[in-house]
Amino acid sequence: AQSVTQPDIHITVSEGASLELRCNYSYGATPYLFWYVQSPGQGLQLLLKYFSGDTLVQGIKGFEAEFKRSQSSFNLRKPSVHWSDAAEYFCAVGPGSDMRFGAGTRLTVKP
Amino acid sequence: DTAVSQTPKYLVTQMGNDKSIKCEQNLGHDTMYWYKQDSKKFLKIMFSYNNKELIINETVPNRFSPKSPDKAHLNLHINSLELGDSAVYFCASSRGVRSYEQYFGPGTRLTVT
């Protein structure tokens, strides 16, 4: 069965600094990979997804992620973090009908 | 024109009561889901319906019963509520069962006292 590991429970970065959130997956075939963001008291919003093709995918809010099959990773990056990026970030592996989520990484942004 | 909506947003009730949470999507999607998010933010799928038919039923107590009257609605009924049922419940939908991303509702925070 597919599974996702997000090794970092909590990350703190300064506003304007770069960000990388780690995600490792386990899946028997070509994975369908997603990153979602959850702001406090809100539902989950899709940031980006990878199904096939170019391994570097661009998402909303200036985020990007790179799929590395050899490392079973799908790390999320942003070159310059804004205070509004403070939230919980979830990596997930599909297919869509049986999506499994990681435990989440809480991002705190320091002024 | 909310894509996936849930009612109520907050639900406070006592142990032993029966309650329902409603979910509606106006995206024209075929597949709908219920997730439970615990106090540590861990998200676990509970049920998945495709075209009103149950396709995933994780290990969930049979006190939880989903009902899909049509493709746009998936309600969750919970009998004999227990303290451990306190959580945030999210409804989601997707275009189909394979590969498509899911769109989430705002969640329903259930507190059982």
Image: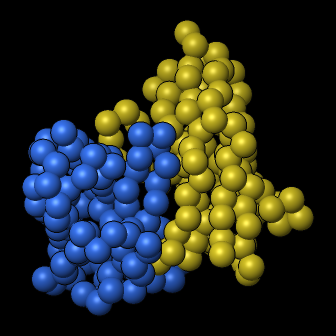
How many marks on residues?
A: 0
In the rendered image, residue A40, in percent from the top left (x then y), is placed at 37, 33
Quarter of the figure with the C terminus of chain B: top left
Q: Name the foreground residue: B93 vs B62.
A: B62
Chain letter for the part of the structure drawn in blue: B
Q: Residue at x 33, y 49 (%)?
A: B84
Q: Nearer the viewer, residue A78 or B56?
A: B56
Residue B20 position within the rendered picture, expressed as x and y whole percent measured from the top left: 13, 62
Whole-percent x, y for residue A62 in the image: 58, 40
Which residue appears at 46% of the width and 60% of the height? B44
Residue at x 86%, y 59% (from the top left corner): A71
Q: Residue at x 22, y 42 (%)?
A: B111
Image position of B19 (left or right of B64): left
Q: Is residue A56 positioned above or below B65 on the image?
A: above
Q: Position of residue B99 (x, y in %)?
A: 54, 77
The image quarter in which residue B46 lies: bottom left
The answer to whether B12 appears left or right of B53 in the picture is left
Residue A55 in the image: above or below residue B40: below
Q: Which chain is yellow?
A: A
